Image (cartoon, coloured by chain):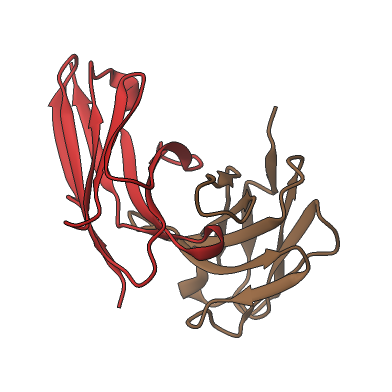
Chain colours: A red, B brown
Amino acid sequence: GQSLEQPSEVTAVEGAIVQINCTYQTSGFYGLSWYQQHDGGAPTFLSYNALDGLEETGRFSSFLSRSDSYGYLLLQELQMKDSASYFCAVNNQGGKLIFGQGTELSVKP
Amino acid sequence: DAMVIQNPRYQVTQFGKPVTLSCSQTLNHNVMYWYQQKSSQAPKLLFHYYDKDFNNEADTPDNFQSRRPNTSFCFLDIRSPGLGDAAMYLCATGEGRSNQPQHFGDGTRLSIL
């Protein structure tokens, strides 16, 4: 079977750093993506890792360890607007995505 | 400018009455995907078109059908909606390569009366 595990919710304060972990078990793995979804909105692409290591894009970074089937999304200098759901997703052949259940991030003042 | 456009944003239909949701794209992507997302759950892939080739997921009910008349447009048809089909339906496009992101529309929220 295919499964992704991530925490259901995380709470942090403005200006803090938060890490959202994701472990996966899938058949066929080309990479790990992260998407952000605000309530009632569309998922938007944040980051993608095909190889082990850290990818940095502004305040957001994503890490992958293929040998551990593990990745995380790191959000720095948290802002209120970062309150949203964050989904890790395994990239399969042909661009298909298998999503985790999502982590709801609440940023408090 | 919106690149993946879904209409309408909100759709209400009656139990058992066929309904069609539409999606259009200006990205000229090869692949168009349809997802179902229920509250506080992950988007679940229903099917996708790679160009004109239709690819159904194994667990997608027969009640769900799709059409792609040209590169820009894709439709989701629900032949006999049941109460369990109330959800957000998301359309996405992509280049069909594993290292390229998908681009999502804002979704259509379907309610069943």
Residue at image position (54%, 45%) is B100
Query: Among all residues in the image, which is located at the extreme right?
Result: B70
Residue at image position (63%, 71%) is B14
Residue at image position (85%, 59%) is B70
Near-viewer residue (B32 or B5): B32
Q: Position of residue B62 (x, y in %)?
A: 60, 85
Q: Position of residue A77 (x, y in %)?
A: 23, 15
Q: Is residue B76 left or right of residue A98?
A: right
Residue at image position (51%, 54%) is B98
Quadrant that contains the C terminus of chain B: bottom right
Q: Is residue A103 left or right of residue B18?
A: left
Q: Is residue B33 left or right of residue A16?
A: right
Near-viewer residue (A11 or A69): A69
Q: Is residue B74 above or below residue B64?
A: above
Q: Is residue B5 above or below residue B45?
A: above
- Among the 4 quarters of the image, the one containing residue A25: bottom left
Quadrant that contains the N terminus of chain B: top right
Q: Position of residue B19 (x, y in %)?
A: 70, 68
Near-viewer residue (B90 or A55): A55
Q: Position of residue B15 (x, y in %)?
A: 59, 76
Number of numbered tags placed on the structure image: 0
- Among the 4 quarters of the image, the one containing residue A27: bottom left
